[in-house]
Image: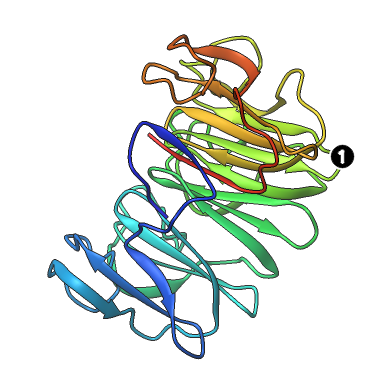
Amino acid sequence: MKFGKYLSVIIVVVSCSVVFAGEPNTVWAWGLNRFGQLGDRTTTKRLEPVHVHDLTDVVAIAAGYEYSLALKGDGTVWAWGSNRFGGLGNNTASDRHVPVMVHKLREVVAIAAGMYHSLALKGDGTVWAWGYNANGQLGINTTTDRREPVQVHNLTDVIAIAAGDYHSLAVKRDGTAWAWGWNHNGELGDNTTTERHEPIQVRNLTDVVAITAGGYHSLAVKRDGTIWAWGSNGDGQLGDSTTTNRREPVQVHNLTGVVANAAEG
């Protein structure tokens, strides 16, 4: 889902271009459609919702910059729209105007979409990634794009994932947070601005239960209901009463009892 740019939002009212509707868990979409990202067999912009073709039993959705993802109840992942960096995961570079199944991926329980890269969490706690990788956001110790899913290195027992524009995040069952990819603004939370091509642990952050990636900043909810933020802060999106970028997590001010979060920009 995509929300207003350059902000952080807690318990968000949905404002997105791809939504669930009806039975049995069909998907509807509207807005720009130059690359077929609405999945209605056309590239026509739609001002009202249209039915995404040939897609049922959907349990989760995600939207990248010019493409869309869906997770079905059988654990398969489906994608449509722009495919120039391999974000559809079907081993081609051809755009698709209707959903196609992501190759070699089963038993998925969660999905996330960055600007041009995608993540999937499998039931066994491993994370898989595909698409654009110039900043190491796939976590495979290279900067080579991938047109099919590859397993993120050195990362197991994961319970949650998130994707920023060019960085990726994960939460492990032990409550630690891990990050990889672009880090110019400190969005990896390791007290550096060094790009990382494999996961590293976010510093000074434990008991995490949920995580979200904005375009260039990151947010985490802790078990005690506090929310912590790091990365780009030029518009105050970290909520710490400053506009100073943060390379490590800082607590968002005047906010407790949080159960969910979202971010963009």
- Residue in the picture at 40% in, 70% down: 19
Residue at mark 1:
174
Measuring 67% from the left and 48% from the top, which residue is drawn there? 259
Which residue ends up furthest to the left in the rendered image?
44
Residue 143 picture location, percent across and down? 49, 31
Within 10 Å of disc 1 (Cα), the crowding (few <14, some 14-19, many 20+) is few
Please indicate, yes or no, whether residue 92 appears anywhere in the rendered image.
no
In the shown orientation, is residue 6 left or right of residue 219? Answer: left
Left or right of 143 in this view: 68: left
- Comparing 233 with 256, the one in front is 256
In the image, residue 97 sits, relative to residue 25, either above or below, namely above
- Placement of the N terminus among the 4 image quadrants: bottom left
Name the spot of residue 18 as percent of width and height, x first: 36, 66
Q: Which of the pair 10/136 is nearer the observer?
A: 10
Secondary structure beneath dot 1 equals: loop
Extreme residue toward the front, this view: 254
